[in-house]
Amino acid sequence: MPSTYRRLDHGNQLADRTLRRLGEEARIARMSAGLSLREVARQCGCSRSQLSRIERGEAAEASLRTLTVVSNVLGMNLSARPFPEGPPLRDAGHARLLSRFKSRLHPAIQMRTEVPLHGDHGRRAWDGELALADETCKLEAETVLYDLQALDRRIAHKMADDHVERLVLLVADTRRNRRVLREFHTLIGERYPLATRELLAYLGSGRLPPASGYVVL
């Protein structure tokens, strides 16, 4: 619960800052063009009071469509795109998957969860990290495989940014996930040459895998 509240508070703070920034830029663009609130509001199809609230960063009710239209009328292009910042909120199934995996590890192998990328100031994190003496191996866990190619790109970016050479991809054992893995067997074979049985053999005997691999569990 505390983690959920922190996410909610942080999300609201980001939304407030974004609204203030958009409003300030809209006000500057309108005044630079010598346009009145009434004239711009008429072209945008909103009320003068709503446009005034937008400029003050107080229009929490304004839709993305309205903000985009206001920006466009003022000669700007509003673009919204999410960027990774911190680990996503996971469900209980994700925690159970990590717990099942941990139970298969040799006692000599330590497992940590939510491990930030080096120098990323906590904005992104690995689902886990396996440590043995001075060796480490990162871990990503997925309960549902939706877009495997998008997942592969995200993981590749994280590995490059964190200078990671080997990774364990942990996947929940479901009919859907096995079907996706079969459909993308070439990609999986290239990225994760060690399959479930071989990788678990390494981890169960107290050794980290020499290369990346995937585990269906």
Image: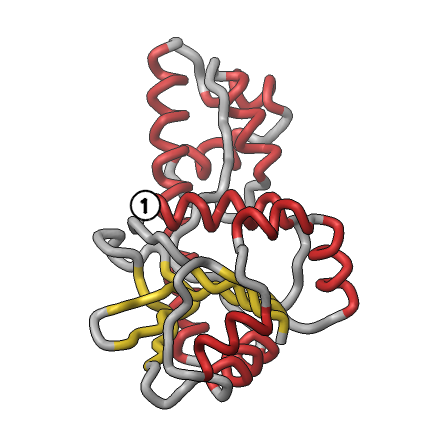
Asked if residue 88 can be seen in this view, the reply is yes
Asked if residue 135 lies left or right of residue 197, the reply is left
| Residue at image coords 36%, 56% | 124
Q: Locate the N terminus by quadrant.
A: bottom left
Residue 142 found in image quarter: bottom right
The answer to which of 201 and 150 lies nearer the viewer is: 201
- Name the residue nearer the viewer: 75 or 124: 124
Q: Where is residue 195 drawn, in percent x and y? A: 58, 64
Looking at the image, what colour scheme do you see? secondary structure
Q: Quadrant of the C terminus?
A: bottom right
Q: Which residue is depicted at the point 71% across and 63% down?
A: 177
**Left or right side of 177 for 111:** left
Q: Nearer the viewer, residue 144 or 106?
A: 106
Dot 1: what SS?
A: helix
Report crowding for label 1: few under 14, some 14 to 19, many 20 or more residues within 10 A (C-alpha): few
Picture coordinates of residue 164, whole percent (x, y): 33, 53
Q: Position of residue 213 (x, y in %)?
A: 51, 61
Do we see residue 13 in this rendering? no
Relative to 44, residue 8 above or below? below
Q: Quadrant of residue 35?
A: top left
Q: Nearer the viewer, residue 90 or 17?
A: 90
With respect to residue 99, does 43 lie above or below? above
Instruction: Locate residue 91, reporting x and y percent.
Output: 57, 74
Q: Residue at x 53, y 55 (%)?
A: 192
Give the residue at the far top of this rendering: 33
Q: Which residue is mark 1?
A: 161
Tell me the amino acid under the disc marked 1: Asp
The residue lying at 69 percent from left, 73 percent from top is: 173
